[in-house]
Image (tube, helix red, strand yellow):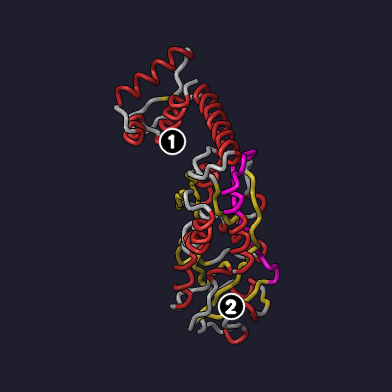
Amino acid sequence: MDLHQLEHILKISEEKSITRAAEKLFVSQSSLNQQLKKLEIELGTPLFVRTHSDWQPTPAGEVYLQAARTILGIKKDAYSKIHDMAEFNRRHFIIGLIPERGIDLFVSIYPQFHQIFPDVILEPVECNVRTMQKKVSRGEIDLGLMTLTSHQRDENTYHHMAYEEIFLAVPATHNLAGNGSRDTANAPEISLESFSQDPFIFISQSSTMYELVNELFTSAGFEPRVLFSTSSNSSKHRMVNAGIGCALLPAMFAAPAENIVFFRLRQHPHWEISMCSRKGAYLSTAEKTYLNLCHTYWSET
């Protein structure tokens, strides 16, 4: 198997289009198409089901793609080991960041990382957790920041950073607001059932927090009256502050505000903040240093 060919076939699968794949690879569509047809003749079976707008791998294609990812992963690990032995630091790592919180981590630790490894290029890429898990598995992201519950982990390797509690944020005009606290440190405990008649700003289904929140309402024995959903915890915070409704917020986003009071739920719900790497991947000295800096960041946050 030619390594460039492996990368080209993987790009077709990733883009679900030979046209878009050719554009990303900076090759002509005709040459990429010829390369694929030649490979399919060699294998004696098609690797993709072709449609005008969406190419999907056949069962044989899935086998080829999995083997391609394994081979390219072996190559990457071998190169990383050799570069460490040779103290070669001119490398390029792709760092996955979840929206809203990821960039804060990156800008906080990058200056120190760059001081230690001035020749290493870090490329930050933002995406949601489920997309990032797939990209880590495929070797398209080297290290990814994630927030998720333990049962949402996949076959990748997870490096624990911290646990983060989820708080109830309520408008200061609420009739129970007098029992709450302006900050989470002093937030009193309360049952979610006490808010069964209140409107909520909900987290969207694309978030890994959605399952956790749903379970809390199920345990409380009622279905929340949802005004609307958003994937942004910052937006939820702003809407509570505007008196629009209540919301469940991770600790990082439960910042003191003029018109918000906080409660701690009696279950003390939480999720895990982790850094994720491909299962079995060799972590270079630079990647281990990045992880150590992440540990320090979360221990001090």
Residue 283 colored in magenta in the image: yes
Q: Report the Cα–Cα distance between label 1 and label 2.
A: 43 Å
7 left or right of 209 in image: left
- Circle 1 crowding by C-alpha within 10 Å: few under 14, some 14–19, many from 20: some
- The image shows residue 102 at horizontal and vertical percentages of 50, 59
Callout 1 secondary element:
helix
- The image shows residue 15 at horizontal and vertical percentages of 40, 36
In the picture, the quarter occupied by the C terminus is bottom right
Residue occupying the point 56% across, 57% down: 210
| Residue type highlighted by circle 2 | Phe
Q: Which residue is mark 1?
A: 14
- The image shows residue 76 at horizontal and vertical percentages of 54, 35
Report whether residue 56 is seen.
no
> Which of the pair 11/284 is nearer the observer?
284
Residue 196 colored in magenta in the image: no
| Residue type highlighted by circle 1 | Glu
Q: Is residue 9 above or below residue 229?
A: above
Residue occupying the point 53% across, 82% down: 174
Please identify the quarter of the rendering in which residue 67 is found.
top right
The magenta stretch is: 266-291
Q: Mark 1 or 2 closer to N-term? A: 1
81 left or right of 35 in image: right
- In the picture as drawn, the residue positioned furthest to the bottom comes out as 178
Q: Which residue is mark 2?
A: 262
Badge number at residue 216: none
- The image shows residue 167 at horizontal and vertical percentages of 60, 71
Report whether residue 128 is seen.
yes
Please identify the quarter of the rendering in which residue 196 is found.
bottom right
Q: Is residue 166 above or below residue 33?
A: below
